[in-house]
Amino acid sequence: MHKLLTDTPGERMLLLGNEAIARGALEAGLAFATCYPGTPSSEIPEQFFRISQETDLYFEYSTNEKVAMEVAAGAAVSGLRVMVTLKHVGLNVAADPLMTLAYVGIKGGMVIINADDPSLFSSQNEQDNRYYARLSSLPMLEPTNTQEMKDMTAQAFDLSEELGLPVILRTTTRLAHVRGPVHLGELTPIRKTAHFDKDPFHFVAVPAVARNLHKVLVEKYDRAKAISDKDACNEIIGNGKWGIVANGVAFDYVQDAVADLGLQDQVSILKLGISYPMPEQMCIRFLQDKEKVLVVEELEPINENELKAIAQENGIAVPIHGKGTGGFSRLYEYDPGMVRKAVAQYFGMDYTPPEAVDTSDSPQLPGRPPNLCAGCPHRATYYAVKQVYGADAIYPTDIGCYTLGLLPPISMADFVICMGSSVSSGCGFSKATDQKVVSFIGDSTFFHSGITGLVNAVHNNHKFTLVILDNGTTAMTGHQIHPGVDTTPMGVDRTRISIEKLVRGLGVQDVHMVKPFKLKKTVEAVKAARDFDGVSVIISEEMCPLFAKATGQFKKSKPFYVNHKKCKNHRDCINQLACPAMYLDGDQVEIDKNLCIGCSVCAQVCPENAIVPVKE
Amino acid sequence: MKAKRLVFIGVGGQGNLLASRLLGEAALSGGIPTVVSEIHGMAQRGGIVESAVLMGDVTSPIVSNGEADVFIGFEPLETLRGLTKCNAHTTVITNTHPLPPFTVAIGQGAYPKVEESLGLIRRKVDRMIALDGNQIAEAVGNPLALNMVMLGALIGSDTIPIQAEDMKAVISTSTKKAFLESNLEAFDKGMQSV
């Protein structure tokens, strides 16, 4: 049994924040969940994927976040309790349905889990999605620890049904990936089926209907605001004359800072658990009797600006500061030491922070950037393409493990902004310049948002090569399935869509199927694609070895070693491939036989044929 | 209980995330308030993996620079790189077995001599415990048990209020039977090496 199905209310478990969210959803009777995986939210759907195989929960990995949101919307307006999980940039993809779903509203509780990523641990930007709550007028909850992640998720379903609106629960990397104690509540049985009651003048957002729906949304917002003012998630802690306002993980930093500095009697904290709509009356009460107020929030000065507006409208002259105080900026995540220092400084306390050791006399340390794994098929594909196109072609890339092709010695990533952009930006590069263009996209990302770009390329007669790196899984986020995957080893039965047939069906005339570990044939295919006058597609097919190992599909090959009698130390292997199985022993290249998976790519690169399989 | 802040640094695949999670479980079962934080995703592709365990009167899940009470480094270069987490009162427990990054293999920088690194660390912090964790793991016949060795050294350092029995109980319930004996042996050997 999945541990989150443990039916012992009151038991305390150490749960990852994302597991706590999944548990909260189960305690609220979640019936239906969708997502496209995105770090730092991916562990939530991972639980649902497994739990759906044990219970009546319906779960799917949808093709992308927009699809996930729309699938969920259909289930929610029919009356089921649904959840969509995504990362901050995933909500950009789903923003279109979100904005009008807010007008139309829902019947069954719908909770959208949005994971922001301050400091960009695994993202292309650090946008602050609290703005989406404002843009859509949807309520936003912000837990501050694992217990609240569970409890507020369950509460969000009730709030959603009370208002007839989707509710957004926002986490950040530091909450999603924290393990903390959680007291379990009761599991609620799943209601499996629903019935959609037709009501076109409510659900069909044509202008005449939507004009009225906007009014309805504004009324719902007013109700949400009243709830926010009464709800226990919003709380004033302490009676001091100095005020601190905080949300999310920053609240933890503030709480510790106040305790560490011994300011419990001087400070009171306004904790914003429902951060949108802001609890206006509570804010007024809080601001009225303060001498000064510090707003502690990561990323954008949203609470700060809204508090200043509330103070101005209500004639409260208290000084309110946030960004620009201490080390507080709009950049990157905060940390406990930074907040402690800023609190001490703002309220004029004497405080000497612990002094970090001086490392100025440390030698220059070699970097340890992440790298493609030993035997990663992407490395082979990159190598083959580079043999044909060299370093001068433009290489738009996309989002996945293969983005690591950015780093030397591969150095084949020239442009990436978002999922799917490799294909469409390739259209732009090839039209705007005389340079050769080769775009790289992974299989999952191709299904996510590469297909429309490829249609565009064919229709508008663009000329470039698209390489689809098909490793049979969504590798970067933890090996999730996608429409091109054979799902039987994962224990589920989903229809597999052939990338080749799809690409041919879109009208691409020049399509090459290659096995990247066969370097010579791959290079020939790249040459043919280069010489084609139009859009050509190379589908490079080889399963991710980590995924293959995890699912029992790995075909063991003999590892390779360097025969030093033959090796003349050109080092093409190590210098051009930089496979992590290779290392230097003194002046000699060696291969770690425990890491080598026997892909043989280095053996094909060696001009002396000095790399050979280990003998028994 | 006064807050204790522990930082674990390792390289993808060394198992420091499991070590920090098990420590969190042991603390929780001993009734000590605990938060454990991890970084998943991009960093795991052979990069540096950091986790933190905070116990006692503290709610923040991460450790700022200069604020680690105990710093557990699974690889000597990464111990040296991560030293900014430490202050003059920190206890550092480090593995001495080097795992050179591939940047060294392709000529982008040199791997610092382990003895010199250890010397630098020793001079800057209150206490340094250095052990060849890989050798100990190999000796018990389980090369993957480095994390158990390091947990053993941590408990042996007597820097946190967690008993060896409690830690071993958690290890016992969380590891596969086939590895249980060697894991516990690795833990004991780690403890004895302090």
Image (cartoon, helix red, strand yellow):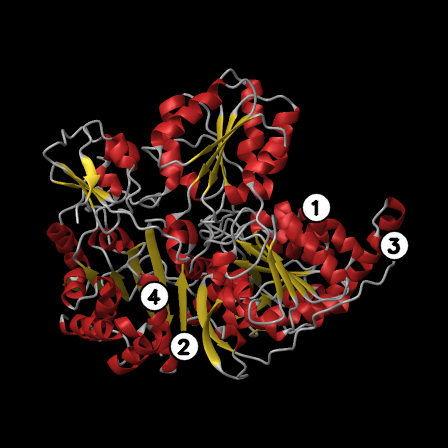
Could you classify mark 2 by the number of other residues whose Cα lies within 10 Å: few (under 14), some (14-19), or many (20 or more)?
Answer: some
Residue type at mark 1? Asp
Q: Residue at x 53, y 33 (%)?
A: A422
Residue A426: x percent and y percent? 54, 27
> What is the chain letter for disc 4?
B
User: How far apart are labels 3 and 1 at the CA level?
Assistant: 20 Å
Amino acid type shown at disc 4: Leu
Q: Quadrant of residue A60?
A: bottom right
Tell me the mark number nearer the camera, choosing from 4 and 2: 4
A579 lies above or below B174: above
In depth, the one of A81 and B162 nearer the eye is A81
Q: Which mark is residue A117?
A: none
Query: Mark 3 highlights which residue?
Result: A200
**From the viewer's perspective, is the residue at label 3 or at label 2 nearer?**
3
Q: Which residue is mark 1?
A: A96
Numbered marks: total: 4
> Going from the N terminus, do you reach mark 3 or mark 1 first?
1
Q: Closer to the camera, A408 or A250?
A: A408
Subunit of label 3? A
Residue behind mark 2: B33
Image coords of residue A238 (percent x, y): 55, 74
- Position in image of residue B66 (x %, y %): 30, 59
Q: Is residue A455 above or below residue A321?
A: above
Farthest residue, direction top: A434
Amino acid found under the numbered disc labelled 2? Pro
How crowded is the residue under tag 1: few (<14 C-alpha within 10 Å), some, or many (20+)? few
Q: Nearer the viewer, mark 3 or mark 1?
A: 3
Same-subunit check for callouts 4 and 2 = yes
Whether residues under marks 1 and 4 lie with C-beta atoms below 8 angstroms apart, the answer is: no
Q: Report the residue at 52% width, 55% height from top.
A: A487
SS at circle 1:
helix
Q: CA distance from mark 4 to mark 2?
A: 19 Å
